[in-house]
Image (cartoon, coloured by chain):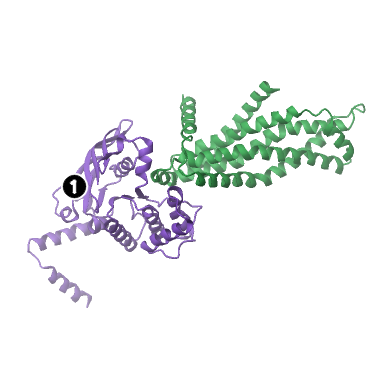
Amino acid sequence: MTFFTEFGSYLLTLRGMFTRPENGKMYWKEFMHQCSEIGIGSLGIVAIISIFMGAVSTLQTAYQLVSPIIPLSTIAQIVRDTVILEFSPTLVCIVLAGVVGSKIASELGNMRVSEQIDALEIMGINTKCYLILPKLLASICVIPMLVVISAVLGIWGGRLAGTATGILSPAAFDKGLHQYFKPYNVFFAMAKAYTFAFIISSIPAFYGYNVQGGALEIGRASTKSVVVSCVLVLFADYLLSALLL
Amino acid sequence: MIDIKNIKKGFGEKVVIDDVSTTFKTGKCNLIIGTSGSGKTVLMKCLVGLFEPDSGEICYDGMNFSEMNEDRRKELRQSIGMLFQGSALFDSMTVEQNIMFPLDMFTQNTLAEKLKRVNEVLHRVNLEGANKKFPAEISGGMKKRVGIARAIVLNPKYLFCDEPNSGLDPQTSLLIDKLIKEITVEYNITTVINTHDMNSVMEIGDHIMYMYQGHKEWEGTNKEIIFSKNKLLNDFIFASEFLQDAKDLRMLEVKGKIDMRDIDELNKQVDG
């Protein structure tokens, strides 16, 4: 029963966002601010994770491919597909669910508890539209870009690790990168990125916006939003794989 | 003028506001007083539309707020200013940005015009030079004054203040009260204040409504409140022995049984 109540409330919150903005310029400013917060703010952690993720996949793939009849360039091919299909969209979005999700939930929760949302309401501003929509749109614009950057850095990290450890030469890695490349995989990764971006921004926004209580409740809402976002990202990952692959 | 008629509001089984009617007059400081949990804040939230009353009417200068659609409410809200208990300033913005926010959102003024208006209201609340400070860098009293400045920047017709003196020392409280009173008279605003500060009641209470357990128990002015025979009101106002003694002295003086000048003389002798 609680699930249906929460789901209904979530849908109503989303519906409430879609009204005519009071002042387009202010909304644009807020959208750009959120793009910078979410995009630039998460770039460092995304870069670190991606490089190590690619490097580790190269080493572990090489460790498992022991047959002399399999060419070394296959390692690069496996790393490329793993990074594009799964690691960059899913792993990065799970990390972003923690980084961006907790930030959105705690920011909105704090605004709710300190009556800043009430202050905006009384000014005549649709707070769902002004506070949630720019975050949602910014996530949908910026997170797929982060996923693309992550994929590039992941593959580069794999190449770097392969070369540095002497597992395969840069030429063999580059050859493997071009082998049997399917552009559809990129489309699939982008479909996942857009879906996950929606989940990891709308769920924390919902929990943060509807916080009632004080600091403890903000913490709980933040944790819950990250947990629910992660579970939904994994569920959506499975669903999209089953439908699109 | 704000007219409220037979407002009722409950949460589940619990009735929080029970059939409250009154009129808040223009150019006056209208105070809602009462103990914690008497329904003051809920009533104020109903007035500004943060809560929807279960029944009854709220009329702003004859316009029925309860029957307005969302667009008309938005329009009306631009003529409402509110000072919150915790000031509700936007943490990430400077004092200037906080005050400029309603101007940015609802006017097409140039930056120079907006800055001029911000400086005007900052001057009005005696906070010149605090433009670039963040809310975390200013005191509680200053936050309240910034809250007032933000509330009046769009020249509102109605001003709501929720516990404007909470957490402030008596001197700062008096300053805030004086400021609210001056602004009310100067701009001819309908001001509604939620408080349980007795200094405010005596200083600025042009019209006072005492609420007890969700209903209106007493209504009058600060001149009348001290002589009220209402037991619940008296228990609330004269909760401390000090205030009770002060009242008894005043009553004796009114009845001509003592002369306060004698007491002043006595005080001087004790001090001497």
Q: Can residue A214 be seen?
A: no
The quarter of the rendered structure image containing the C terminus of chain B is bottom left
Q: Residues within 10 Å of mark 1 (few under 14, many from 20)?
A: some
Point out residue B195 in the picture as x, y percentages from the top left corner: 29, 51
B207 horizontally vs A143: left or right: left
The one nearer the camera, B21 or B149, is B149
Chain identifier, purple in the render: B
User: In this orientation, does residue B265 appear?
Assistant: yes
The relative height of residue B234 versus residue A5 in the rendered view (above or below) is below
Q: Nearer the viewer, residue A114 or B89?
A: B89
Looking at the image, residue B171 sits to the left or right of residue A57; the answer is left
At 47% from the left edge and 40% from the top edge, which residue is drawn? A21
The residue identified by callout 1 is B219
Q: How many numbered dots are placed on residues in this image?
A: 1
Q: Which chain is green?
A: A
| Residue located at (44% from left, 57% from top) | B114
> Residue A84's image quarter?
top right
Picture coordinates of residue B104 (x, y %)?
46, 51
Query: What is the residue that sits farthest to the bottom in this orientation?
Result: B272
Picture layout, residue A235 above or below residue B8: above
Mark 1 element type: strand
